[in-house]
Image: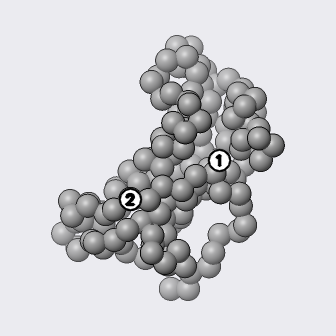
Amino acid sequence: MIQTPPPARRLLHALRMQVRWGDMDALGHVNNAEYLRYFEQSRIAWLETLGIQTTGKGTGPILAKVTVTYLKPIVYPSELEVRLYAAAIGNSSFTLASEIVNGRDAAERFTEGEFVTVWVDYEAAKAVPIPDRLRAILSGAA
């Protein structure tokens, strides 16, 4: 399979991690569900660097849609880098693009994904506008 790099985007965050033995499945590669955990860990780590709490109180993000394309199996042992990019910004939602690459050879891409996130008022269970500070970060203005 020919792997093509993603379109040029501004990197928001990169997280390095090790594949754990328990991430593997009976087929000898990382289970598909673990990729979602890797992506989730990256998004949460990024939000934490911004001081955004994910406690379910006040306002904050919820995941509305996930699209993942598996390019190449990951096997143990591997060092990974999960990269996070801003893709699209709406009024109350934004899309993050992400990729998982080999932590020792970034040209080797394992998977890519897109994550539509909605900013909500948790108590009201209603979408609200993305905070100005976050909008500025996503748009590259901050």
Crowd band around label 1 with a 10 angstrom C-alpha radius: few (<14), some (14–19), many (20+): many
In the rendered image, which residue does mark 2 sit on? 17
**Mark before the other along the chain sequence, 2 or 1:** 2
Residue at the spot 45% in from the left edge and 75% down from the top edge: 104
User: As drawn, is 109 to the left or to the right of 80?
Assistant: right
Residue kind at label 1, given as amino acid type: Thr
User: Could you say where residue 120 lies in the image, as x and y percent from the top left?
Assistant: 60, 25
Q: Position of residue 112 (x, y in %)?
A: 53, 64
Q: Secondary structure at mark 1?
A: strand
Which residue carries the number 1 mark? 95
**Which residue is located at x 49 percent, y 17 percent?**
57
Kindly check if marks 2 and 1 are in contact, taking CB atoms under 8 A apart as contact: no
Q: For the C terminus, which image quadrant? A: top right
- x and y, in percent, of residue 74 in the image: 36, 72
Q: Mark 2: give few (<14), some (14-19) or many (20+) Cα within 10 Å.
A: some
**Residue 81 image position (x, y, % from top left):** 47, 63
Kind of residue indicated by mark 2: Met
Q: Indicate whether 141 appears above or below 1.
A: above
Say which element carries label 2: strand
